[in-house]
Image (cartoon, rainbow, N blue to C red):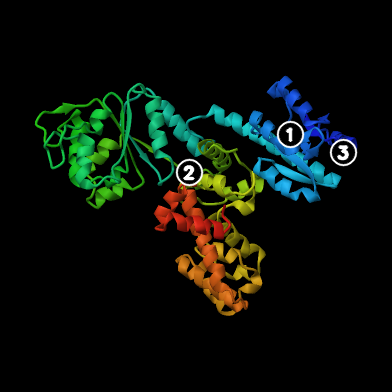
Amino acid sequence: MKPIWIVDDDQSIRFVLEKALLRENLPTRSFTHPQDVLRALADTPEAEGPQILVSDIRMPGGSGLDLLEKVKERLPGLPVIIMTAFSDLDSAVSAFQGGAFEYLPKPFDLPKAVELIRRAVEESQREEVAEERMTAVPEMLGQAPAMQDVFRAIGRLSQSQVTVLITGESGSGKELVARALHKHSPRASGPFVAINTAAIPKDLLESELFGHERGAFTGAQTMRRGRFEQADGGTLFLDEIGDMPFDLQTRLLRVLSDGHFYRVGGHSAVRANVRVIAATHQNLEQRVKEGVFREDLFHRLNVIRLRLPALRERREDVPMLTRFFLQQSARQLGVEPKRISEPALKLLGSFDFPGNVRQLENLCHWLTVMAPAQVIEVKDLPPEVLGSVATAQSGADDPVGAALPSPLSGAAAPLLASLPPAALNGAALEAASTAAAGSATWEQGLQAEALALLENGRTDVWDVLTRRFETRLIQTALANTRGRRIEAAHKLGIGRNTITRKIQELDLE
C-alpha cells in the first residue's frame, strides 16, 4: 500500500501519528514544510505517491490551504485531511471548499484520528478500483446478470444487420443499447440518426422521417432530406415507436419492406440503405389488440427483441453507476468529483428509481450541485430517497410508525420522516395515515405535516412550510437544469431576480 504523508512543523504531532499508524500497519512518510511535499510530489511517480495526505493548516513554511490547492491540481482524487485548532474553524470551512476530505481538530483524540485516516484510506482505495472499472467500460455499465444478457446479445448481433426492437421502461437506456448495436455492427462507419417519434407533432413527423420537396406545403422553400436519407449507409433509431401515428405506420412498413419511399410532395422514389432499430416502453402486443398499432409492422420490427431491465432489477449496479455519473457530472461542470459514503450508497441501492438510470443520472447531477461537502453522506440525499427509506424504517423501529402504512414511494414519506414521533398524535396521526396510503397525494402529505405542527403547538407553521416548499422546489429545478439559474427560473415561471433573491433568502448558495 502507498504511504500516508503527514505534514506538520510540530515534531510531536508527527511522532504520535507515525507510531499510531504503524501500529495499524499503515506506512507513513513525514514532512516539516509544504514545500518539501511539493518537491517530493514532483520527484515521485504517481504509482508510488501518497495514499492520503494529512496536513496542518498553519506552518512557518506555508499554508495548508495553499498546499491543498496545489496538491489537488496534481492529484485531484487524493483525499486530504486538514488538521486545525478549534479557533481555525473558519479555515476548516475553506478547506472543505478547497476539496478536503475532512478536517481534524486539534488537540485530537488519537483513536478517532486513526479511524478517520483509515476511513480516508478505504475511500481512496475504493475510488481507485471504481476508476479502473470505469476506464475499462466506457460505453455501458452493468455487472448484473440481466445486463450481462444484454451485452451478450449485443455481441451476438455485432455482425448482423437485422432489425431490432428494444423494450424497457423509460429511462432504462434504450438509446445507449441502440448506439452500441450500431457501433459494433458492419455499419459503424456510417451515420447513427435518432428520432423520438413521440416528441414530434404528427403533422411534422412525416416530413422529419421522409423529407419534403420544395413547395410541398407552406413554408417548404427548399428541398429537405429526411432522417431516412440522413441515415443512409448507417442506422436509424426510432424511439417510442409505439406512439407513431397509424397512417405513418403504413409508410414505415413499406420502407422496411423494400427500402423505397417518397418525400412529401415528391413523385420519384428514393432508396435508402438503412438498418432500423426501434424502441418502446409500451406493450406493443396490447397496442395491436387495441387497434392503434399495425400487426404487420409489429412483426416486421419484432425480428430480434432485446428487453432492458429496470434499475430496480439490477440493484447491484447502482454503486458503479453512481460513481460513474458523479465523475461525469464533475467533468461537465468543471468541478472536483464528489465521493459518496457506503451508507449513502446502500440507501440508494434500496430505492426503487421509477425513472431508472436517467433518474439516477439526474440525481447525481443534483448531488454534484447541491451536496455541501466533498463526501456525500446519507443526509445529503434528496428527499424522495430519504423519505422512502424513512417510511420503511418507521414501521420496524417506531411504535407510532408501525401503525402507519409505509409504501416505498408514498407521497407523505418525506414529510413524515422529518417529524418526531411525539408530533404525530390525534388528528395529525389520522391525517398522516391517510396521506401515507398508496393513493395519497402530496396535498394530503402537506395536510398531515401542517396538522402535526399545529398539534405540536407551533405558531410559525406558515413560514416553516413555505420555506421548505420553496427550498425543495428551487433545488429540484436547479438539479433539473444542472445549476443554470435562468433556465430554472424560466421553468418555474418566475423571474431571474426572484430566483436569485430566493436562493439568498433560503441560504441555498
Front label number (3 vs 2): 3
Q: Residue at x 60, y 78 (%)?
A: 455
Whether residues under marks 1 and 3 lie with C-beta atoms below 8 angstroms apart, the answer is: no
* Residue position marked by numbered label 2 in the rendering: 357
Image mark for residue 13: 3
Q: Amino acid at mark 3?
A: Ile
**Residue situated in front as seen by the camera: 282 or 370:** 370
Q: Give the image location of residue 69, x and y in percent.
A: 67, 35
**Image point 45% across, 34% down: which residue?**
150
Q: Earlier in the sequence, mark 1 or mark 2?
A: 1
Distance from disc 1 to disc 2, alpha carbons, whole Å, reads: 32 Å
- The picture places residue 63, in percent across and down from the top left corner, at 75, 37
Q: Are marks 3 and 2 in contact (CB under 8 Å)?
A: no
- Indicate the secondary structure of the residue bearing disc 2: helix
What's the residue type where badge 1 is placed? Ile
Residue marked by disc 1: 52
| Mark 1 element type | strand
| Image coords of residue 267 (percent x, y) | 9, 31
Residue nearest the observer in this picture, 364 or 304 = 364
Q: Are marks 1 and 2 in contact (CB under 8 Å)?
A: no
**Is residue 263 in view from this perspective?**
yes
Q: Would residue 1 be seen by someone viewing this image from the given angle?
A: no
Above or below, 335 relative to 136: below
Look at the numbered disc 3 and give the secondary structure of its residue. helix
Whole-number angstrom distance, CA of label 3 to CA of label 2: 47 Å
Residue 217: where, in percent of width, then height? 12, 41
Q: CA distance from mark 1 to mark 3?
A: 17 Å
Amino acid tagged 2: Val
Label whose residue precedes the other's in the sequence (3 or 2): 3
